[in-house]
Image (cartoon, grey):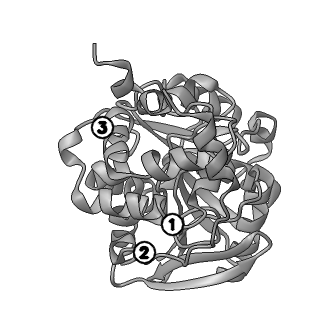
Amino acid sequence: MSPLWKRNPFVGFGIGMGRLGALALALKPRQRAARGVIPDEISPAIFATRSVSTSQGELVYHVSGSGEPLVFLHGFFLGASSYEWSKVYSRAAINHEVIAPDLIGFGESERPSKSVDASDHVEYLAEFLREVVPQRPAVLIASGVSANLSLLLASRHPELVSRMVLFLPTDLRDSNKCRTMGIVRRSRLPGVSYLIYRRHIAQLPFIRSWLESYGFANPDKITPETLSVLVNCAQQYGAEHAIFHFFKKRHAFDVSSHLSSILAPVHILWPAKAAGFHPSDAVNLCRHLPRASMEILPEASAFAPMESPDDITAAVSRWIDGDLTALQTS
């Protein structure tokens, strides 16, 4: 068995951290850093980058194509951004209008220090959809926590959503899921959390180890481009706030009471190689949704949109461009 520090890289770093040094760091004035340069690879060249103002701050998004609007929502993880879906959504722009935002707290969008909970995310996404695709319901393609947020959005604003493809919908109320993703409670000592994040968590060695342990089924498929984008986004000014809120499960909510009211068709893509996640979670969602189906992807990992985009593109296209009459309720 590999050593504890390798299985959970947070552990080794925290050992031996002195209180005096932490206090000195906490008392030291911090200057607001200028916004860093985001790599061009975050979005394909054919996409225009635009922004809209929402109740939670500026939201940056990438857009290209024409036709039925497809909105790709990335998950909540270290260094997250619209890049997660970029190898998938770029191919959909041939027949659709593709829109890929960086959610508030991530990527190029606003990174506020205040907590943005599930309801906040849903409401600014509703504002975003009304602004970007007015009078047109959109297809939502979402992963992880954003998949569950999409369900909540569809229950509150059904006029904005035509259908959904949800990849590994994640409920943060389950602490085991958080541990599986390498998430542990952050230190409560003044300044230690910021120091750990900046000096360790947001650095390339940690992110590479984290992807190898939790994200990719085949570590050989972790490309230099993927590492560059994730590290860059993780190191942006204010990026730590979204991760700290994730640690505290500020985005956790119970979606079960809303499922029966969601009339939009839902198709769940479940990666069989996502360690710690069981298909029974997807089956349970399907049982409570009026119009739902699911598909198990036997070779897919938790980060399959980045690791195996060809497989995910095919799975999304089969449902988006296929015959909806074939949809069956599980």
Q: Work out how far the residue at label 3 is from the one at label 2, CA to CA, in angstroms.
A: 23 Å
Q: Residues within 10 Å of mark 2 (few under 14, many from 20)?
A: some
Q: Which residue is mark 3?
A: 212
Mark 1 or mark 3, earlier in chain: 3
Q: Nearer the viewer, residue 320 or 185?
A: 185
Callout 3: SS: helix
State which mark lies toward you, 1 or 3: 1
Q: Which residue is mark 1?
A: 236
Quadrant for the N terminus, please.
Answer: top left
Callout 2: SS: loop
Q: Position of residue 274 (x, y in %)?
A: 40, 32
Q: Residues within 10 Å of mark 1 (few under 14, many from 20)?
A: many
Mark 3 or mark 2, earlier in chain: 2
Quadrant for the C terminus, please.
Answer: top right
Amino acid beneath label 1: Gln
Q: Nearer the viewer, residue 88 or 61?
A: 61
In the image, is 125 to the left or to the right of 106?
A: right
Q: Residue 271 lies in what quarter of the image?
A: top left
In the image, is 185 to the left or to the right of 221?
A: right
Q: Position of residue 93 (x, y in %)?
A: 40, 76
Q: Residue 163 lies in what quarter of the image?
A: bottom right
Mark 2 or mark 1, earlier in chain: 2
Above or below: residue 96 compared with residue 154:
below
Discs 3, 2 touching: Cβ within 8 Å? no
Q: Which residue is mark 2?
A: 38
Q: Work out how far the residue at label 1 is from the one at label 3, CA to CA, in angstroms.
A: 22 Å
Discs 2, 1 touching: Cβ within 8 Å? yes
Q: Residue at x 43, y 45 (%)?
A: 200
